[in-house]
Amino acid sequence: MSFKEYKTHVEMGDTVILYLNIKNIHAITVTEEVKNKKGNMVPNIFQTVYGALKVKDLVGMKYGSQVQMTRGWAFALHPTPELWTLTLPHRTQILYTPDISIVLTQLELRPGSVVCEAGTGSGSLSHAILRTIAPTGHLHTFDFHEQRSRLAAEEFSAHGVGDYVTARHRDVCGEGFDLDSVADAVFLDLPRPYDAVPFAKQALKKSGGRICSFSPCIEQVQKTCDSLRKHGFTELQTLECLQREFQVRKSVMSVFDLSQPPTDGSADGDERPSKKAAMEERPREVLTGIPLTTMPGHTGFLTFATLPPVMTSAT
Ligand SMILES: C[S@@+](CC[C@H](N)C(=O)[O-])C[C@H]1O[C@@H](n2cnc3c(N)ncnc32)[C@H](O)[C@@H]1O
């Protein structure tokens, strides 16, 4: 299965997104059998709130079509980085699509870009980067947790994007990226991003590039900004992405009668409506947008900066 291009029908080995409803979405791998808790191979039956699904029955189905289960139905969707972010196995905290979209845009990524990322974590951001830079770019992604790095590499291969990524087990704050002047952009999601800044500078191309650091705490942001300035980065900017959702509702409101100016009613023979009457005169049903009282809170601060090109005497 590939996250970089689409196909029409489900095949054995594919990752399929089983969409039951907005709060109930699962990524499943299409195989005839799976290992049970005792380590024995048993038929791959996926249990959902709408009943059981024989996973091998998905083979040959058109992506996007309805899947019948024992007590209801779902949709078999083609995987995308956005759906993977909603369904992936969490090995760490992850980046979500609103922050990811800002990262991709602000880092100016496009097909052919070379990117360094640390840490790999659960590979949520990595999948979105890979779709953006394929088929001519490359992602070098690092994590100092060996198992996370290995599992991410296995997922990249299973998802058909393995050729565009090198996943390495490495402490980038202590040992750097082991890359010199190759990257167009660097992304850091680390507890101590400021320690990785000099290594990020080394990895970026001499023609310059962009960096982003994601940190939940403002103290990390302050230290990262100090380090970025110290190492010659410019155009520092810190953003926070907060989603404010609106509910569309009908509501009854009093509407001012603006066809005539209201009066205080003091002048004799004045037939214009009084101020009070003008306000109360025309209660009307209107369509309004009301912000929800609850909203997803702070995820993290996104600090962006530019490394300007190195000027040589020949330039
Ligand atoms: C929050 S997770 C990254 C999540 C990732 N951005 C995603 O969207 O799935 C942070 C990762 O950084 C790794 N890490 C922390 N310090 C590191 C270092 N010095 N070098 C490499 N990886 C590091 C951790 O092991 C962890 O997996």
Image (cartoon, rainbow, N blue to C red):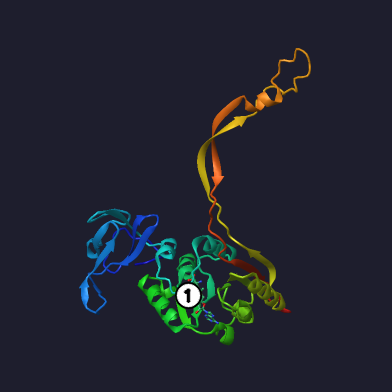
Q: Is residue 100 visible?
A: yes
Mark 1: is the Cβ under 8 angstroms from ligand 1? yes
- Snapshot quadrant of residue 254: top right
User: Relative to 21, is 38 on the left or the right?
Assistant: left
Q: Is residue 291 above or below residue 131?
A: above
Give whichever of 168, 255 is nearer the camera.
Answer: 255
Q: Which residue is label 1 attached to?
A: 121
Determine the residue located farthest toward the top in the rendered image: 269
Which residue is pictured at 41% across the width and 65% down the height?
A: 84
**Image quarter of the N terminus:** bottom left
Give whichever of 106, 84 is nearer the camera.
Answer: 84
Q: Amino acid at mark 1?
A: Gly
Give whichever of 124, 205 is nearer the camera.
Answer: 124
Label 1: how many Cα within 10 Å (few below 14, some 14–19, many 20+): many
**Image quarter of the C terminus:** bottom right
Q: Is residue 274 above or below residue 148?
A: above
Q: Secondary structure at mark 1?
A: loop
Which residue is pictured at 58% across the width and 69% down the height?
A: 216
Give whichever of 180, 21 is nearer the camera.
Answer: 21
- Snapshot quadrant of residue 64: bottom left
The percent coordinates of residue 81 (x first, y second) are: 43, 64
The percent coordinates of residue 213 (x first, y second) are: 60, 71
User: Relative to 54, is 119 on the left or the right?
Assistant: right
- Snapshot quadrant of residue 290: top right
Q: Is residue 258 visible?
A: no
Q: Is residue 271 above or below residue 247?
A: above
